[in-house]
């Protein structure tokens, strides 16, 4: 099988490479694709150096699966063209709400891969991916009515330039130098910015609307969800404070048990100092960690959770590769 990674030099593209190195997917040919400015660069994969080629000149008929990790503008221009020749797993937001494109987290809705109308599968927003993987087993048992989620998102979700800016700003603050913000609306170092992506007319940001719309499409359109998304000066991993209201009653023991037994989830919930997972501890891990599990006694059938996951890994690269694994395992459902 031949595979291509478009955006191979970016944060998510490189993370897809890391995941593929650890997986058992048999790869005959691996093509690393990026913009013309990266043409000719070399990236190591399994002790071999692979030359990066230009997207403008790449022939997608040479591959069976193409991972796109280069942003919505690139996906808008190239994904449909690539999908004429191969299956595309797209990490951008461009196709997520297309009714003919499945939006997939394999542990949650793998059955949506059975009918591929456009040869395109969308990967959800990283904050959505970690949310639905924790909510799926709870929804199956207790039926979620409403979700209130506040996110605490790392700068890696905004790309490598934003990670570099956090590092530079932190140095400037510690050295009493003036701060200049390039990739953020305000200083990110030692700060919190309640603004991710553009504002819509109703006051919500696009990031918040992504969480709402994508969760409904993946999990259940009947669920009500409201979100507030905040950027924090953290390198990697997104955290979420989640308040749920169920239709059915529940016990905390049942919640812990069902989460611990669901693929991709790990409960770390000790009511002692340090008995929870932080973004730093989630970095580099495949699991979505759930902590601070407790009843919300202000509403009927209410539950509070703290969810943490590596946004580049669990929220993007790993999910994309797991989609590919599911397609391969099922022989592309006859495609």
Image: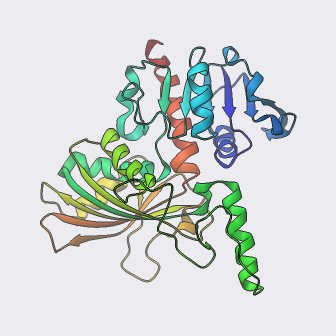
User: Which image quadrant is residue 174 in?
Assistant: bottom right
Compared with residue 4, is residue 285 higher up or lower down, i.e. above or below?
A: below
- Residue 205 in percent (x, y) is at 43, 56
Q: Is residue 50 above or below residue 140?
A: above
Asked whether the viewer can see residue 284, the reply is no
Residue ID at (43%, 76%): 275
Colour theme: rainbow
Q: Is residue 24 left or right of residue 199?
A: right
Residue at image location 42% in from the left, 36% down from the top? 104
Residue 244: x and y in percent read: 25, 61
Residue found farthest to the front = 201
Question: Residue at the spot x=18%, y=49% of the render?
Answer: 143
Give residue 44's quadrant in the image. top right
Q: Residue placed farthest to the bottom in the image?
A: 176
Residue at (81%, 40%) from the top-left corner? 43
Q: Where is residue 332 in the image (x, y as percent from the top left)?
A: 48, 18
Q: Can residue 26 be seen at all in this image of the molecule? A: yes
Which quarter of the rendering shows the N terminus? top right
239 vs 47, nearest the viewer: 239
Q: In this view, does 109 lie to the left or right of 3?
A: left
Position in image of residue 129 (x %, y %): 44, 48
| Left or right: where 14 falls relative to 88 | right
**75 and 146: which is toward the camera:** 75
Tell me if residue 259 comes above or below residue 243 in the rendering. above
Indicate the quadrant where residue 155 lies: bottom right
């Amino acid at each position: 099988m031949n595979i291509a990674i478009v955006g191979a030099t970016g944060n998510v593209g490189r993370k897809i490479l890391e995941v593929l190195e650890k997986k058992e997917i048999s790869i005959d040919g691996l093509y690393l694709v990026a913009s013309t400015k990266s043409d000719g660069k070399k990236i190591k994969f399994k002790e071999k150096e692979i030359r990066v080629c230009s997207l403008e000149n790449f022939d997608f008929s040479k591959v069976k699966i193409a991972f796109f990790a280069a942003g919505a503008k690139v996906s808008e221009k190239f994904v449909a063209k690539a999908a004429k020749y191969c299956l595309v797993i797209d990490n951008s937001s461009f196709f997520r709400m297309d009714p003919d494109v499945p939006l997939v987290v394999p542990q949650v809705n793998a059955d949506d891969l059975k009918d591929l109308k456009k040869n395109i599968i969308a990967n959800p927003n990283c904050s959505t991916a970690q949310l639905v993987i924790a909510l799926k087993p709870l929804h199956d048992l207790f039926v979620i009515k409403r979700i209130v989620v506040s996110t605490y998102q790392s700068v890696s979700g905004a790309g490598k330039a934003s990670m570099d800016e956090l590092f530079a700003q932190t140095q400037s603050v510690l050295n009493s130098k003036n701060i200049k913000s390039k990739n953020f609306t305000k200083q990110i170092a030692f700060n919190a910015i309640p603004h991710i992506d553009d504002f819509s007319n109703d006051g919500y940001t696009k990031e918040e609307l992504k969480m709402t719309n994508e969760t409904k499409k993946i999990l259940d359109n009947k669920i009500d969800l409201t979100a507030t998304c905040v950027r924090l000066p953290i390198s990697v991993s997104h955290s979420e404070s989640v308040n749920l209201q169920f239709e059915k009653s529940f016990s905390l023991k049942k919640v812990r048990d069902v989460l611990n037994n669901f693929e991709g989830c790990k409960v770390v919930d000790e009511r002692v100092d340090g008995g929870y997972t932080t973004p730093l501890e989630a970095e580099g891990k495949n699991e979505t960690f759930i902590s601070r599990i407790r009843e919300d006694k202000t509403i009927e059938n209410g539950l509070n959770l703290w969810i943490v996951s590596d946004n580049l890994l669990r929220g993007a690269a790993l999910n994309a590769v797991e989609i590919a694994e599911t397609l391969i395992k099922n022989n592309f459902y006859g495609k």
